[in-house]
Image (cartoon, coloured by chain):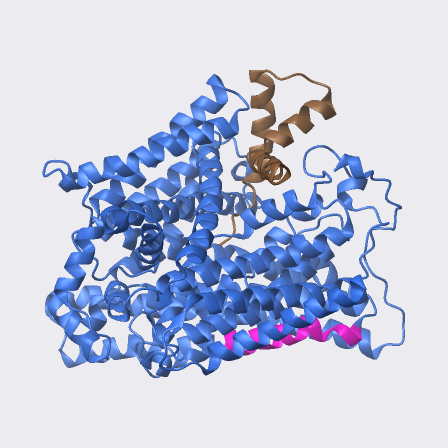
Chain colours: A blue, B brown
Amino acid sequence: MKKIAGRIVWALISLAAGFFLAAIAVNRGEPMNSFWIVLAAACTYLVGYRFYAKFIAAKVMALDDQRATPAERLRDGHDYEPTNKWILFGHHFAAIAGPGPLVGPTLAAQFGYLPSVYWIIIGAVLGGAVQDFVILFCSMRRDGKTLGQMARDEIGKLGGFTALLTVLFIMIILLAVIALVVVNALKGSPWGTFTIAATMPIALFMGVYLRFWRPGKVLECSVVGFVLVIASIFGGQAVANSPVLAPWFTWPATTLAVAVMVYGFLSSVLPVWLFLAPRDYLSTFIKLGVVAMLAVGILLVHPTLQLPAFTRFVDGTGPIFAGKVFPFVFITIACGSVSGFHALISSGTTPKMIAREWNAWPVGYGSMLLEGFVAIMALIAACSLQPGVFFAVNSPPGVVGATPAAAVSTISNWGYPVSVADMNALAADAGEKTLFYRTGGAPSLALGMAHIFSTTGGGPAILGFWYHFAIMFEALFILTIIAAGTRVGRFMLQDLLGQAWPPLKRSTWMPGVFATSGVVVLTWGYFLYQGVRDPLGGINSLWPLFGIANQLLAAVALCVGTTVFIKMHRARYMWITAVPLVWLVCVTFTAGYQKIFSDQPRVGFLAEASHLQSAINAGTIAAGKITETQGTIFNDRLDAAVCGMFLIMVTLILVDSVRVWYRILSSARQVTVDESPFVLSRLQVEEL
Amino acid sequence: MRAFFRGVMTLLREIADENAYQRHLRVHGRVHSGAEWRRFLDDRLARKFAQSKCC
């Protein structure tokens, strides 16, 4: 009886998923309430989790709770420790949730909500969650090996080396693009700049508090830090209203870019307990809290989406970034549905903490679905803005015009009416001088979130607080990623250069630490500065580059997964990883090709370089601008080279993988699986 | 509801490394002190921040 009731419930959920997805797809002209999208995502994710993921777990991976996991076999109380599955679920989710699923869907909203909704829902179920789950499984069966180690062991030395190199290059581009998001959110904003600047001494205070005053009291210290950060938001308001103090914190984008680089350098060379660790604790707690608040806010307010299902920009003429809906919506959303970076987490700490094999099902697959939900919420927040406001905030002056009057005229002519008075009123409510040209996604997302939060109570009177709270939340954890990424980049470089000159490898040799930190900061800083100076806003060139790199890393992870399935004699199920792999290769190679070779200057790097060179040759560039234009030409060619390098590296891994698959599938000889041996689990329930 | 909040607190302690510290004390048979905490934290953070954070 219970079984029949269960089947009826799941049949109803499946029907509901199909109904809501169809209703969203066919709706035109009628305002779309966000509740439909929330329900479509919830029902589809439930069905995917219950049926597709369970099928993979049972039939393909053959998960076995009798088999001792590395957490049990290698238990050391440090890295390897059997952990309760829901605790590990939260821990893993906190590790994979970054700015990508928030910023990506916000930028992709320029195509309208429909392409993004479908890709976030379907991509997560069939691609992203599968990748995370499969890599977690592979690593768990191999004593917690990293993606790079597995690529080397399963595919070959070339694959392993290329995977490591890909990670390093992706990190450089990632750090540059997320730094650009912060810079664009804070430029000309004394309130935001003061709030973020105040988090630096707060972090130092927390570091000392935790190390010397109250050792071990991390939660207590984080509560103190949170109270101080909230106080700094109010302090920022006072600074913004002060005619004396406001100019001190009103910084142009170039100054902010230099400040972020100095911050990255200091984070890399200062003791980790003093600065980076306290910020990391605080930002993780705030991130989880804000995600929960946004979920509650959307359920309470369930705003109507103001952006249409499709905008006119599906044709590739979008102001935020150029390029048609295919392939650019997939590249732009990135982490919200498929993220190659997750493979690094799934083969990092998490596999060493899995208590029972079946726990990989909720932890690996379920966490990614939750991240898909975060992406859906970010999309809803962005799409709840009036389209005219959304485009006025996100469009660079190089596209819509250098004055507010020109910008509103251009945007209104596109069919998305907005006026300077509307924008000024909104800026005043948000406590900003202007909200024009705030490219990067963070400000429009913060506006959408502030709108939802203030609707639950307080109204427009506290819109400014919520806007700056959202900006603080985004900037705080983006800056923590920049700090941690710079440090990791420094380690990688020290390792690499240490092969040639051993002193560089020592993390205690300060000249080496300073030099390698400087090189890493200057490398991502160069791309950041290039983005800041770009008249098209920087996001147009850097976000697609990041998206392509991230999706290509996912392709590397899926190559590893497919190879493992074949070696496990599960070749008949290789479509589970091979289909998303083929899709990602098609999408990323199309996007990569277009970014390099498209003949439209706003899309193709080489076309823009050629266009600018022709303008210089024709004498249409003012004499004072020639040096700057030549710099842009160089940067375009550099971006094209970086993009081409990503494509070449992944082609190498793909070719190597196909060679391995062919050799195994065409040969009659038995292939052995490189898994840890079976050991019977003796873990007791009360140990968890 | 109580179980839910207990679960949330355990998660927060896990993220805060407080649970890991308790495990460290148990495994090595040591008692809490400022010096012990600093020894644990230095080792923990060195490994934690050897990996990049997710995007």
Magenta-tinted stretch: A571-589
| Residue A208, horizontal then vertical, whole percent | 43, 23
| Residue A82, horizontal then vertical, whole percent | 73, 40
Q: In the picture shown, does residue A189 fall above or below A326?
A: above
- Viewer can see residue A173: no
Quadrant for residue A566, please give it. Answer: bottom right
Tell whether A422 sits left or right of A440: left
| Residue depicted at x 20% and y 57% | A426
Task: Verify whether residue A209 appears in magenta.
Answer: no
| Residue A403, horizontal then vertical, whole percent | 12, 66
Quadrant for residue A619, please give it. Answer: bottom left
| Residue depicted at x 63% and y 48% | A89
Task: Verify whether residue A574 appears in magenta.
Answer: yes
The residue lying furthest to the front in this view is A1
Residue toward you, A313 or B53: A313
For the C terminus of chain A, which image quadrant? top right
- Viewer can see residue A176: yes
Tell whether A533 sits left or right of A380: left
What secondary structure prevails in the magenta region? helix
For the N terminus of chain A, which image quadrant? bottom right
Q: In the picture shown, does residue A660 fall above or below A598?
A: above
Tell whether A94 sits left or right of A135: left
Q: In the picture shown, does residue A43 fall above or below A454?
A: below
| Residue depicted at x 13% and y 71% | A406
Tell whether A347 sits left or right of A270: right
| Residue depicted at x 75% and y 48% | A143
